[in-house]
Each structure stands twice: as structure tokens, then as C-alpha cells.
Image (cartoon, rainbow, N blue to C red):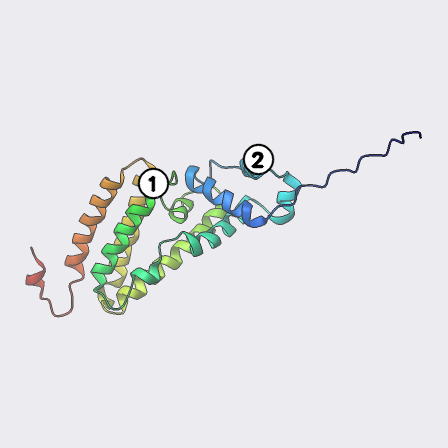
Amino acid sequence: MARTNKPKPRGRPRRFDPQEVVSTAQALFHAHGYDAVNVTDIIKAVGINPPSFYAVFNSKADLYARVLDRWSNTGAIPLAEILRDDRPVAEALAHLFEEAARRYSNVTGATGCLVIEGTRCNDPEAREVACLFNRAAEKAVREYIAARHPDEANRVTDFVSTTMSGLSAKARNGHSLRQLLETARIASSALALALPPKGVSPEERRP
């Protein structure tokens, strides 16, 4: 019997889970920074082609927005667990600083805060997304402080935000966990003076 040469079926483009792309991009953005990662890096890491990527994501900034949505539910500092009403405000914020120091340190190869570092990126669209997340976190901190220390809420929130940004930047620059924790604890000492428990006089605040 004569052998027929049937045309080989053309291979279909690789199907992929968009969440795999988001997860991979999150790791790359966190390890290297938003500006240092391009779409080619991401699609190579996942093993897809550009048309497949752009069929799901409009741009790198759009992907970054989805990364931050995912990160806020899986990797962000759990503010609701830390900022509890059953503990002194200064104690809760001290816990926040130490948690930031531990999470920002180079334990897994990803340093700093994914959101805070994004607020400094060069892409205006991505930067605005990061700022939205950052402002939401600041709002949660401000409201927590204001519930018991309304007169101090704005200035202490600024102090908390500045300290968190500094911890993230120093982590990106190579500070060790020990150094970050020391900074966090010094900052916590200042909070203890600024936000004493109710009923403690100014004289009793002083060491």
C-alpha cells in the first residue's frame, strides 16, 4: 500500500494561566525592581509569546496593577492583624516596623516593599498604581492612630510612612536584617514617647 504524506497538524500556541504570569512577574519585579524588568523578561520566564501576553494584559503597567492586587492578598504586611484595638497604638506600630524589617530584608532574594519601591519607578502609570496602594495603607494607619490619638494622627502617620520608606530603601541597598531591626527598634522608641498609653503624663514619658 502506498504511503500517503499527510500534513502534520500545526501546533497550537501554548495555553497559559494568566495567574502564572502574574506570579512570575511579581517575583521578578520584587527581586529586580519594576524598571529593570521588561515584558520580554516576563514572557521568556513563563514560556509564552508576545501576542499571548498582550491578549490578556494591555501593558506592563497593567500587569503590575494585577501583581499588586495579588500581592495585597498574599504577600503584603497584614495591617488588620497588627493594628489591633486591644493593644497600645505605639506597641502595634512597633510591631509594624519589625514586621517590615523582616519582610523587606533579603531573605528570599526579594528586597524592599513591592509597593513603596513602585512609587519611585519611572513609569507614570505604574507609579500611580503603586501610590494608590501606598495611600490606602497610610489611610489605614492614620485612622488607627486617630481613633485614640487624634491630635497626633497626621504627624505620626508621616513618621511611620517615612520610616517604612527608609527601611525599604535600605533593604534594597543591602542592609542586613540586623541593621533593619535596629533601625525599626530605634524608631519604635520615638513612637513610645509620641504616643504614650492613656493616663501617662509627659514627665513619665521621658526616660
Q: What percent of the width, then of the height, locates residue 137?
A: 37, 58
Q: Quadrant of residue 176?
A: top left
Is residue 198 found left or right of 37 in the rendered image?
Answer: left
* Above or below: residue 19 compared with residue 41: below
- Asked which secondary structure carries label 2, the reply is helix
Q: CA distance from mark 1 to mark 2?
A: 25 Å
Is 107 positioned to the left or the right of 4 in the image?
A: left
Placement of 13 over or under 4, stated as above or below: below
Quarter-of-image position of residue 46: top right
Other-residue count near label 1 (Cα within 10 Å), few / some / many at <14 / 14–19 / ≥20: few
Q: Which residue is mark 1?
A: 107
**Depth order, front residue of 35/66:** 66
Q: Residue at x 54, y 39 (%)?
A: 42
> Residue 170's spot in the image, x, y percent?
30, 40
- Which image quarter is the N terminus in? top right
Is disc 1 placed on a helix, strand or loop?
Answer: loop
Residue 180 appears in the rendering:
yes
Q: Residues within 10 Å of mark 2 (few under 14, many from 20)?
A: few
Count of labels shown?
A: 2
Residue closer to the observer: 18 or 8: 8
**Type of amino acid under label 2:** Lys
Residue 179 placement (x, y as % from top left): 23, 40
Q: List the residue tagged with mark 2.
A: 44
Residue at the top extreme, as displayed:
2
Three-letter amino acid code at the position of disc 1: Val
Q: Is residue 55 left or right of residue 105?
A: right
Q: Which mark is residue 199?
A: none
Q: Is residue 129 above or below residue 141?
A: above
Q: Earlier in the sequence, mark 1 or mark 2?
A: 2
